[in-house]
Amino acid sequence: MADTLELLEMIGRTASLRRAPPRELVELLRHMEATEALKAAAASGDDAPLCEELGHKPMHSPQSTQTHGYEDDGSGQDQADLPPAPEPGQPSQPG
Amino acid sequence: MTLGSHLAPLARSHIEQADVVFAALSDGIVEMWLQRMHPDVRSLQPYYREGKSRMRTYRQWVEVMMAEVRAGKTVCGVFYGHPGVFAWSPHEAIRVARAEGYEAHMEPGISAEDCLYADLGIDPGRFGCQHFEASQLLLYERRIDPAGYLVLWQVGLVGDLSLKRFATGATHRQVLVDLLSRDYPLEHELIVYRCATLPIQRPQIRRLALRDLPHVPLAAEETVVLPPAIPLQPNLAMRERLQALGEHREQPLEDAVPTR
């Protein structure tokens, strides 16, 4: 089976793939020996099969929550809120 | 931004050449992709916690990034979309680093706003375009111009005074609708937009009436766009002034400067 992340990157940077109708994309992915999850995701536009294949990781959207113009909570440094520091080179844990 | 499509070559080079990479991304698969580019990618996501002020989280992000800078490392912070748009900590990290004598700069990225113009076919120069963070629109006296586009960010969190929640509900959104109804009819059609994060996705575009906004599911990363509700109104006084100017030969600036 081909590597799913490599195929996703290739789809993202290849004009003919990025804009291909789902049915055509799935057919191309079949020739590239994509996983069933990637083919299912390409067919539906739903990332759920990919989350299952690669490991679901719930994320907050930083750019949609990073404004603060109306908060006044002082310096805010609270060691109790600190999560364990990620280890260099180790995959991060879900929030 | 979309995986594989929107990471600029220079930004990628910064990632690859850094000693340590910090990541604040919106999608776990995108974070896995980033981990392929560098052996030391540290996610900032674990600092988020329900019930904890987001500002506290963002201050911690600045501190953990600066700790590595102070240790002599070349640090790259990778943020979803454009690192300087709706993002406090990248600006703050750069400010703090420069204040301490370190070299720091920001590379622009492709933001959700950029994708919005392309996917919705909106040219912000056509009628003008205002952008507001939705809560700020409620909490401060702002002037809405319904002759131009109005883009509202973070409507899914609107009215969260605590900054400790990741969503608010219909009652909060109804307050927003009540404010907007001063300038827009309740039947005015708005657009709920979300750009594609993965290249197998398409942008999500929903159209609904303003009055229905409190009653539809709305994620934090979705953006609300209100198209113009009224035509542009000619400014007759300014036109008359410009007309009068046009009837006289403009004196070139250099002619007006006394020569020695």
Image: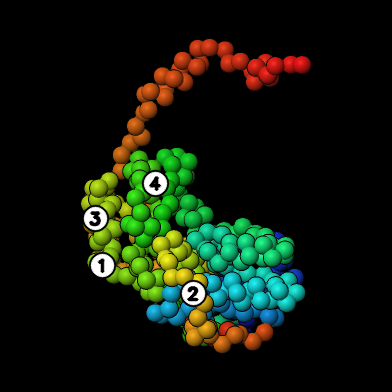
Q: Which mark is residue B156?
A: none
Residue designated by label 1: B170
Q: Tell which circle, 3 or 1, labels the residue nearer the N-terminal end.
A: 1
Mark 3 to mark 4 CA distance (whole Å): 18 Å
The residue that appears at 62% across and 79% down in the rendered structure is B42
Q: Is residue A5 above or below residue B199?
A: below
Nearer to us: label 2 or label 3? 2
Q: Quadrant of the C terminus of chain B?
A: top right
Please give the residue where the numbered disc 3 appears in the rendered image.
Answer: B178
Residue B201 in sight here? no
In the displayed structure image, the side of residue B119 where residue B29 appears, left or right = right
Instruction: Please state which of residues A4 and B98 is positioned toward the viewer in this rendering.
Output: B98
Question: Residue A76 bears which disc, if any?
Answer: 2
Name the residue type under label 2.
Gly
Give the distance between the C-alpha atoms of the residues marked 2 and 3, in whole angstroms: 33 Å
Question: Residue beneath label 4, please?
Answer: B149
Q: Residue furthest top?
A: B248
Which chain is home to disc 2? A
Residue type of the residue flagged with mark 1 = Ala
Q: Are marks 1 and 4 on the same chain?
A: yes
Q: From mark 1 to mark 4, how far is it between C-alphas?
A: 24 Å
Q: In front of the other: label 1 or label 4? A: 1
Which chain's residue wears label 1? B
B242 sits left or right of B185 in the view: right
Decide if residue B20 is on the left or right side of residue B82. right
C-alpha separation, residue under disc 3 versus residue under disc 1: 12 Å
- Judging from the image, mark 3 belongs to the subunit labelled B
